[in-house]
Image (tube, grey):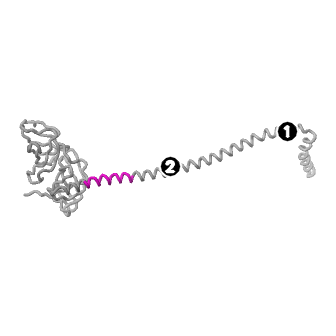
Amino acid sequence: MKLKRILLLVFIAALPISISTYYPQLSDSLRNVTVGTVKPLFDFSHFVSSNITEGTSGIGNFFRVYKENAALRDEVSVLRGKLVKLEELAKENERLKAILAFKQASKARFIPAEVISRDISHFSSWVVLGKGRKDGIRPGMPIVTPLGLAGRVVATREHCARAIILTDVKSKVSGLAQRTRDLGVIEGNGCGLIMRYLPLDSKLAVGDIVVTSGLGGIYPKGIQVGKVDSIATDKEALTLYAVVKPFAELWRLEEVLCLEHIRRD
């Protein structure tokens, strides 16, 4: 049995040699058929292998680029946050410089304070300051900005104080028209300022400047309040009233100066 297997293997091995020896044309034809059959398989295998290698490389590049983009996005976010902080610091620096210049130019004494809370609704307009009795803040102190009058302190605690701003309905300031010298009362209406009780024959005009009159003992004379925006006659036609646009940015108060001018009882 083993001998038969050996003879069969020898025959199979010798067959191609015999064919190539005695029938060279047939051998060439078989070779061509074999090459023609096998070569496409090798070419396909090479193509698949090359594409797999390139695909693997492409996937690796994709993930590397993705990670790099993610790192760049994180870096941009950090830089953007730093830029916002720098811009905020620059704006704060400008405000503090203006306050310092105003304080140095004025002969009055001021206590600077930061606004730490606020409530501005239709009728109520007040702020909480980050300084109080321990810092020298007292009820009745006017609060101002470099642009003009903002309001006054109404209550204090050890380390904070509450102040109403000019637009509060409880706010009243004795005002003076700088050009015509007409007196009136500047009242808050929750969203703006109205200067009432002006004489009918007043020569007041739109654009005129209004300052504190100094009457009443709360506000010293001559602090800028605002500019006349419009003028009309009251319902009873007895007096005029003027809508006054405040100089101080009452809706954006962040730092104020508390004027050491206490009402004389």
| Side of 5 where 89 appears, left or right | left
Q: Which residues are magenta?
A: 81-97
| Side of 130 where 48 appears, left or right | right
Which corner quadrant holds the C terminus? bottom left
Helix, strand or loop for disc 1: helix
Residue 13 rendering spot, x and y as whole percentages: 89, 47
Quadrant of the rendered structure where residue 102 is?
Answer: bottom left
| Side of 225 where 58 appears, left or right | right
Total numbered labels: 2
Return the mark for residue 121.
Answer: none
Residue 60 rendering spot, x and y as whole percentages: 59, 49
What type of secondary structure mainly makes up the magenta span? helix
Q: Amino acid at mark 1?
A: Leu
**Residue 221 visible in the snapshot:** yes
**Residue 128 visible in the snapshot:** no
Q: CA distance from mark 1 to mark 2?
A: 58 Å
Residue 174 rendering spot, x and y as whole percentages: 10, 48
Residue 236 rendering spot, x and y as whole percentages: 7, 36
Binning the other alpha carbons within 10 Å of mark 1 as few (below 14), some (14 to 19) or many (20 upward) gives some
Please name which of the two marks, 1 or 2, marks the residue nearer to the observer.
2
94 vs 21, nearest the viewer:
94
Residue located 62% across and 45% down the image = 55
Where does label 2 land, which residue?
Answer: 69
Residue located 67% across and 45% down the image = 50
Q: Amino acid at mark 2?
A: Asn
Residue reaching furthest to the bottom = 134
Q: Earlier in the sequence, mark 1 or mark 2?
A: 1
Where does label 1 land, which residue?
Answer: 30
Helix, strand or loop for disc 2: helix
